[in-house]
Image (cartoon, grey):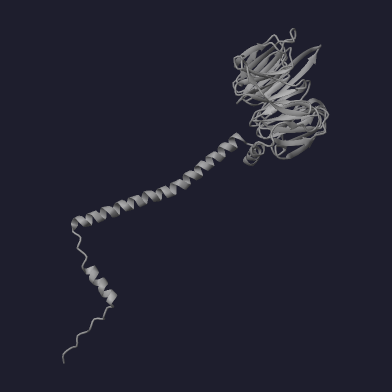
Amino acid sequence: MAEKKKRRPSLSLRAQRKVRKMSTAPDLDEEGYEEKERFASDKSKHSGRFGILKFLIPVMLIVTLLISYFIIVANHPVGIVEYFGSKFASGGSGSGYDLSIFGGKPKYTLSDSGKYYVVTETSVNCYNEGGKVIFERSHAYTQPIIKVAETRYLLYGQGETVITVSSLTDNLYVNNLEKSIITAAISDSGCYAVAAKADGYDSAVYVYNKGNKKIYEWYSSGETVNALALSKDGKTLAVATFSVKDGNFSSNIYFLNFDSADAIMKSGYGDDIVYGLYESGAGRFCAVFSRDIEFIDYKKNTVKTNESDYSVTALKNINNKFIVLRNVAANQDQSIIEIYKDNGELVSSFSVNNYITDFSFRSDNLYLLGISKVYKYDMLGSLCAEADVNYDALYVEAVSSDSIACVRNSVIEKINLTKTGD
């Protein structure tokens, strides 16, 4: 019996068309296959490169952010939250000038990194250069003394026992000491030091970290501490002392690193007193005497002394420059200005035929307050601009190249200077 042929399953019309279309496609020759393989290879290479870039971009971004973070932490050890909080608080224009002064008559002002403090009889006020009020805070000290750092300041009263530490945004700590405070200092790291009287000793120095924990104590017998300064990183302390024997003064400066009570360097002076100490760059401090200015490098164990025949009236450390004012006692109408780099190099020295009561420094220009005028001088001692000021002008703060904030008895006004010869 003949075997029946199997019938192939029928295809749909659409499937038949597809089969016919596929069967009519031209065959690729050898050259076509090579071209197709090259295209596939190039596509694979591009795909691989793009994949590597997709991996590298986020990795590079993370590395950049980490490096930026560690740089900020290294340069601003007080912490990035406080650092950026300080920047935000001190930024902006505010309501601008004129400004009514809160808290009574100003006692003195202090400049620091684009802002300035006005300490009054009952308050501490802080303003930026644009006239924004950063804060206004009351105090109860009879003789208030302020020391400032990048994001913090400390306030105490001479001979009192309470010291307060604050940031631009908050009051942080209140420290009650057993004995009266002599002097204090604060660093950009938030670390601060306090010298006070002590039982059984002439003086004691206490050092606290940025969290207000005591980390070091140093005691002095036979010598009284009268000045302190901390390095920016808060790891080195300079302590100035004085003693009197047979009616003669002598002074010492001790440099301490908190590992021991023994100084890493000591500098002695037989016939003068240290009136002020300032940090002046990595490994250096500046000491102010009655006439001389001394820059001490405790790492290199070197001293650079700048002598003068005239007494120091005032010294300000502004933008890594030390500006010294000397009023000539024999001639009340003559003042001497000296400008030093933080390494002790004398940049400029010149005299002006005016009795100067206060000064400010900005962008290599000096702003000098006289009896009824304010003057702008360049680094070479040339008069560039001037303006009249009110009779009750007390202090000046440079807020732009050609304008100053003039602090008076109850108001701060902005004064524009006119170029000389105009």
Q: Is residue 309 visible?
A: yes
Q: Hey, which quadrant is residue 159 in on the image?
A: top right
Residue 199 placed where, x, y %? 83, 28
- Quadrant position of the N terminus in the picture: bottom left
The number of callouts visible is: 0
Check the image and report above or below for 355 versus 135. above
Determine the residue located farthest toward the top in the rendered image: 330
Determine the residue located farthest toward the left in the rendered image: 2
Q: Is residue 376 visible?
A: no
Check the image and report above or below for 53 versus 73. below
**259 and 34: which is toward the camera:** 34
- Quadrant position of the C terminus in the picture: top right
The residue drawn where x is 67% and y is 16% is 293
The residue drawn where x is 72% and y is 28% is 413
Check the image and report above or below for 286 versus 101. above
**273 and 340: which is toward the camera:** 340
Q: Hey, which quadrant is residue 249 in on the image?
A: top right
Residue 281 placed where, x, y %? 61, 25
Residue 382 placed where, x, y %? 61, 14
Determine the residue located farthest toward the bottom in the rendered image: 1
Q: Hey, which quadrant is residue 164 in on the image?
A: top right
**21 and 217: which is toward the camera:** 21
The residue drawn where x is 68% and y is 24% is 278
